[in-house]
Image (tube, rainbow, N blue to C red):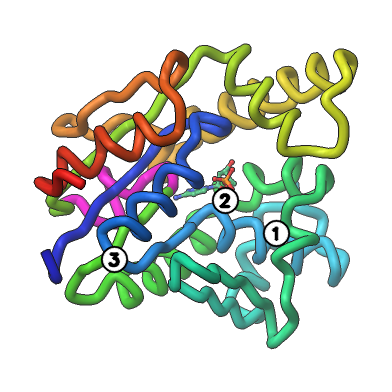
Amino acid sequence: RAGIVVAIDGPSGSGKSSAARGVARRLELRYLDTGAMYRAITWWMIQVGVPVDDSDEVAARSSEPEIEVGIDPEHPTIAVDGVDVAGPIRSREVTNAVSAVAAVPAVRRRMVEIQRELIGSGGIVVEGRDIGTTVAPKAHVKVYLTAHEEERARRRAAEGLAGAKLELTLTQKEMALRDRKDSSRTTSPLNKAADAVVLDTTELNLQQVIDRICALAGEHA
Ligand code: C5P
């Protein structure tokens, strides 16, 4: 399966990253986290003082930062102009600003171009929001991961600083808002590809999700 492309899309907290990375490791494929790229360019916009809601300004400056993504599933990396930003791109500030930046067509054009270059002749698992619909519409395997909203928020809160109840409520609100923005934007919104297999992960553990996707890829590990 050297040339296979596995596209994994879905809303935040649906378990995409862990699943995509796990599948790539098991099937010895490369792994591309496209969300990290949108987060990285958002981080840069905040650093240089571009108001993220000013879409004209975001568009005008979108070609300035150099975004470098490492696609080894054992050590995924993300850097902007040579600076490792793996930590800072997960901050709440970036998380709450990313949807606005990712909605700007000039940003998407640039990211999709880099993504297609990295996908190249395949052998890769790609996760995001528009992989099966826009980035790799000919992907061999397309999975749309979902989970109940409360469960997704619980997972996100558990990843974060504290799992306190207050935190959970806030996370759920912020997540719902981000999903609403990602689903309602004009340019390649979060959407299930017509030929994608829907996998509800609410009642599944990570290994079960990985098993299902690997089975779809024709690999019975
Ligand atoms: O997957 P993650 O939560 O890291 O994605 C962060 C944000 O990047 C999403 O909320 C969305 O706004 C944007 N994104 C996107 N298209 C992708 C991947 C992520 O618009 N393919």
Under 8 Å from ligand 1: the CB of mark 2? yes
Q: Amino acid at mark 3?
A: Glu
Residue closest to the eye, 134 or 207: 207
Residue 82 numbered tag: none
- Number of numbered labels in the structure image: 3
Q: Amino acid at mark 2?
A: Ala
**Is 58 placed left or right of 215 in the picture?**
right
Describe the element under mark 3 as helix, strand or loop. loop
Q: Is residue 99 left or right of residue 146?
A: right
Q: Is residue 155 magenta?
A: no
Q: Dot 2: what SS? A: helix
136 part of magenta stretch: yes
Q: Which residue is mark 1?
A: 42
Q: Which residue is mark 2?
A: 102
Residue 23: x %, y % from top left: 33, 50
* Magenta residues, start to end: 128-137
Furthest residue in direction front, as rendered: 221
Comparing 41 with 125, the one in front is: 125
Residue 191 vs 124, above or below: the answer is above
What residue is drawn where x is 38% and y is 30%?
145
Left or right, 75 with respect to 210, comes to right
In this rendering, which labeled residue sits more in front, label 3 or label 1? 3
In the picture, the quarter occupied by the N terminus is bottom left
Q: Is residue 214 above or below residue 126?
A: above
Mark 3 beta carbon near ligand 1 (under 8 Å): no
> N-terminal of the two: label 3 or label 1?
3
Tell me if the residue at label 1 has its CB under 8 Å from ligand 1.
Answer: yes
**Residue at 33% over, 49% down:** 131
Asked if the residues shown at circle 3 and circle 1 are in contact, with their CB atoms under 8 angstroms apart, the answer is no
Camera-nearest residue between 170 and 3: 3
Q: Which residue was labeled with disc 3?
A: 28
